[in-house]
Amino acid sequence: MSKRLTLPKKRRLTSNRQFKAVLDHGRRAGNSLLILYMAPNGCGYPRVGVSVGKSSGNASVRNRLKRLLREAFRQSQDRIPQDVDYVLIISPSLSRRLKKPEGGARVLASLTFGQVRDAFLSLVQGENRTK
């Protein structure tokens, strides 16, 4: 029987203090979809926090993006380093494309789970690393 990948509360960053610790002390990586901050946590398991600003669109767009990001993390838990906190932020270039009235819905509809997961995994595995 395969291991069930879930996302319980203990695997999420929930407080402003936890987010701030990762943003202040973590490594940063980015691509055209995401900005990823990573910092060691000492918990024995990875944790994730997702931030999607209001500049990314209305509530339904932001919630869809958050669901995609959390699902990418959830399904990748066995392929990423343990003992690390991750903060995922939508890149400014994607936010600008989503905000455009004529193309925002089209951009969101064309954004697949596979693209988000691959963008996340490529950043975690060290591609496009910046500081």
Image: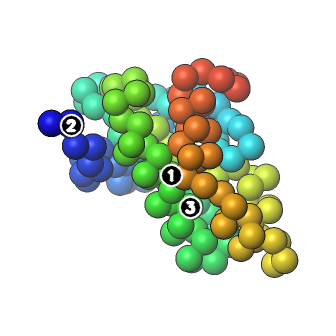
- 86, 60: nearer the viewer: 60
Q: Secondary structure at mark 3?
A: helix
**Residue highlighted by disc 3:** 65
Q: Residue at x 40, y 27 (%)?
A: 79
**Residue highlighted by disc 2:** 3
On screen, residue 32 versus residue 125, left or right, reads right
Q: Residue 12: x and y, percent?
A: 34, 48
Q: Are marks 1 and 3 in contact (CB under 8 Å)?
A: yes
Quarter that holds the N terminus: top left
Q: Residue 13: x and y, percent?
A: 37, 48
**Which disc number belongs to residue 49?**
none
Give the vertical position of 36 relative to 15 (above or below): above
Q: Is residue 131 visible?
A: no
Of mark 2 and mark 1, the one earlier in the sequence is 2
Q: Residue 58: x and y, percent?
A: 63, 77
**Residue highlighted by disc 1:** 69
The residue type indicated by label 1 comes to Leu
Cα–Cα gap, marks 3 and 2 = 26 Å
Quarter that holds the C terminus: top right
Q: Residue at x 53, y 67 (%)?
A: 64
The residue type indicated by label 2 comes to Lys
The residue type indicated by label 3 comes to Leu
Disc 3 crowd, CA 10 A, few/some/many (<14, 14-19, 20+): many
